Image (cartoon, helix red, strand yellow):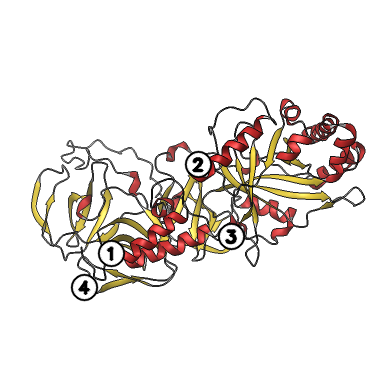
Amino acid sequence: MHTISKRAAAMALSVLLLTLSVLTPLSSRAYSFRENGVDVSWYQGVVDWPRLAGNNDMRFVVLRAGKLASPTSPYTPDEYFDYNYTEACNVGLKVGCYARIAAGSREQLLSTIELYLSTIQGKSFDMPVYIDAEDDALAAIAKREGKTMLTQYIIEAMDMIYAAGHHPGLYANLNWYTNYLDANMVRARGYDLWLARYTNDCDSTDFSYSYDVWQYSQSGYYYGIGPTATAIDLDVSYRDYSYAGDHGRVHDAAYDGKLPAYMYPVHDSAVYYADGSAQYGHSVSTYSQCYVQEAYTNGWCRVLYDEGDGNRVGYLPVEAFFEKEQPATEPTTEPTTEPTTENPEKDLVQDSLWNGILPLRAHVLNEADYQVYAADCTTLTGEVIGPDEECTVEAGFTNGWCRVKYQDSHVGYLPLSSFFAKERKGFGQLYTSAEIDVFGRVPSFPVGSISAKSLFIYTGETPTLIQVIYADDGVRYAGWISKREWYSALLKLLNAHIHGKQPLLERQVSLVDCDGDGAVDVYDLALIKMRLDQLPDAFGL
């Protein structure tokens, strides 16, 4: 979560003071829960839902079910509602819905709610079924009969939604909640409030104690929306809405501490929807790096994966990342002697931060030979690993050491710092826009390359080089790229983010927050440009 920026502080204070006059009481700024999402209607066209849901920070969507455009118009269902509902559920998003209702009287309001309910009949929702009340026809009722009476009519309509088995909600902007509706009456009834107030910065103000969901922008841009860049509304939920019961997804606590993680599948696999049906043409291979977000008790997990121009979301069996453990079998006969061997790694604990990254092939960092240790990390074996010898780093441990396979079949132990510029993962990920040369320990000439649109992962740096992990033909390698290539990639990423074309992933934020203020902005862009300009022409470790 980004902290509030200095230039937004004055705006935040004024908005909070205004909110005090709308809802009471209002507690101090705090978040007990927060989740990001979007709302979608026919305006976005045919949505590529696996790609839209592949945004790392998106977990819910509110769909338009229909509208009554004016008191003299017929109620019309949204032409994409059924498709959007099915596909949003398939990719595992929490789903709510809304209808714009421009009713000119109490009677028309209630009769339109009946049509609204018929549109959503047979569907279950994780989030509320909202009434969008922002319309001049309803405002005329408030002016004629008072906002208390209009609010009472709205509550009657919400009671109908509740009686139909849904949780009701009300959508309006701050002006409406101030002048035309009594939000406290709605909240006292136990129904939810959805605020529209566009600051284009979900951290510039805080409505978490007054509203359940806040629509803070109407100008978001995500891959998956329309054939061209079509704007989409951005929302924040302050309430932890549970998944609908028939989705069958219950968090599996057995994977706590292991997930989320960047991982590679242990075998090629088709990617599935949340209901277990295969997504036609979508698959991952053993060299596809995935971001495994959550595992469920039904044996499946939610995964982000990349197809070169943006993340997609899908579901895979947990076994695609974790080999299934074979059940222990009882021995048929008593052993004749006590076992004479013991686990040499009994005092080592594998570090889950390396899940999905190791094993990989790497060279030791310096030009001198490295002494190899036994599993106790104190006893020398008498063997050495030379600087030109490629090793396989098989496992990383919480004490900062790793198990290494070298000379084809020899196994030993070295500090992780022997291979990585950092002992533990402070990893961030980027995608190439063009082929990038990869250098060895001494960067005199490239020893390989990372192909265009491939993922590479930051693991550390020297004054002139960046250490990365990348995949090639199903094998993962640790190598070095020039800082010039690195900062050029960061510039493209940050430019796309600042101009609203591509949101940052969780593990990209720390890479571009150069001034460390928690806000990713044009100041960071300037710092990256300055660092790029100051780079020397020569390489060097």
Contact flag, marks 1 and 3 (Cβ < 8 Å): no
Distance (Cα) linking label 3 and label 2 = 40 Å
* Residue that mark 4 sits on: 444
Q: Earlier in the sequence, mark 3 or mark 2?
A: 2
Distance (Cα) linking label 4 and label 1 = 12 Å
- Please provide percent x and percent y for residue 450: 36, 69
Kindly identify the amino acid type of the residue bearing the numbered disc 4: Ser
The tally of labels here is 4
Q: Residues within 10 Å of mark 3 (few under 14, many from 20)?
A: some
In the image: residue 372, left or right of residue 448: left
The quarter holding residue 168 reads: top right
- Please provide percent x and percent y for residue 192: 70, 34
* Residue that mark 1 sits on: 480
* Residue that mark 2 sits on: 4
Foreground of the two, 18 or 151 = 18
Residue 218, relative to residue 190: is it above or below?
below
Residue under the image location 62 percent in, 28 percent down:
26
Kindly identify the amino acid type of the residue bearing the numbered disc 3: Gln
Which is closer to the viewer, label 3 or label 2?
Answer: 2
